[in-house]
Image (tube, rainbow, N blue to C red):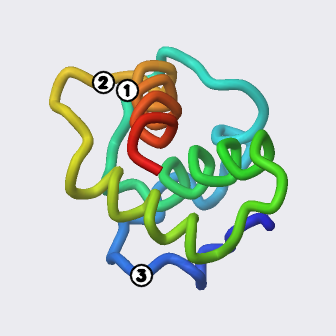
Amino acid sequence: MMLRREDLKLDYSWANELEPHLFNGELTRRKFDRGNGNQVLFLINLYASQNPGFTLEEGLVIEDLLSNQLPLEAKSEISVFTWLREFRATNV
């Protein structure tokens, strides 16, 4: 299941509205901004695409993790996604 903007519970900036292609495709070393809704949604949906049976509830758990538990050391999309996979693998 892919999440939509309307599914997210927290308040975000929706920067780059005119350039939606910025958050499509592959992860980059681009700095992760936990306040950018487009980037948060991109990471959640990328995670969902790699996990069959992914649910809205799981997406909201990930939204909370990114907002409240993401270590400061995770700065790029790649490092955030790596942390997310490892965290979910050991804490499910």
Given the image, on which type of amino acid does mark 2 rest? Lys
Tag 3, which secondary structure?
A: loop
Q: Where in the figure is residue 44, as x and y percent of width and height?
A: 59, 52
* Residue at the spot 60% in from the left edge and 75% down from the top edge: 5
Check residue 75 in the rendering and tell me which mark sits there, or answer none: 2
Tag 1, which secondary structure?
A: loop
In terms of sequence position, does the residue under pointer 3 or pointer 2 come before the other? Answer: 3
Comparing 48 with 86, the one in front is 86
Give how far apart the Cα atoms at labels 1 and 2 are: 6 Å
Q: Could you tell me if the residues under marks 1 and 2 are in contact, i.e. CB atoms within 8 Å?
A: yes
Q: Where in the figure is residue 34, as x and y percent of width and height?
A: 32, 49
Give how far apart the Cα atoms at labels 1 and 3 are: 22 Å
Q: Is residue 9 above or below residue 28?
A: below
Given the image, on which type of amino acid does mark 3 rest? Lys
Q: Is residue 71 left or right of residue 43?
A: left
Q: On the image, numbered disc 1 is attached to which residue?
A: 31
Give how far apart the Cα atoms at labels 3 and 2 are: 22 Å
In terms of sequence position, does the residue under pointer 1 or pointer 3 come before the other? Answer: 3
**Neighbours of disc 3 within 10 Å: few (<14), some (14-19), many (20+):** few
Check residue 9 in the rendering and tell me which mark sits there, or answer none: 3
**Neighbours of disc 1 within 10 Å: few (<14), some (14-19), many (20+):** some
Q: Is residue 72 above or below residue 62?
A: above
Q: Quadrant of residue 91?
A: top left
**Neighbours of disc 2 within 10 Å: few (<14), some (14-19), many (20+):** some
Q: Is residue 24 left or right of residue 87?
A: right
Comparing 55 with 39, the one in front is 55
Q: Where in the figure is residue 17, as x and y percent of width and height?
A: 60, 60
Check residue 73 in the rendering and tell me which mark sits there, or answer none: none
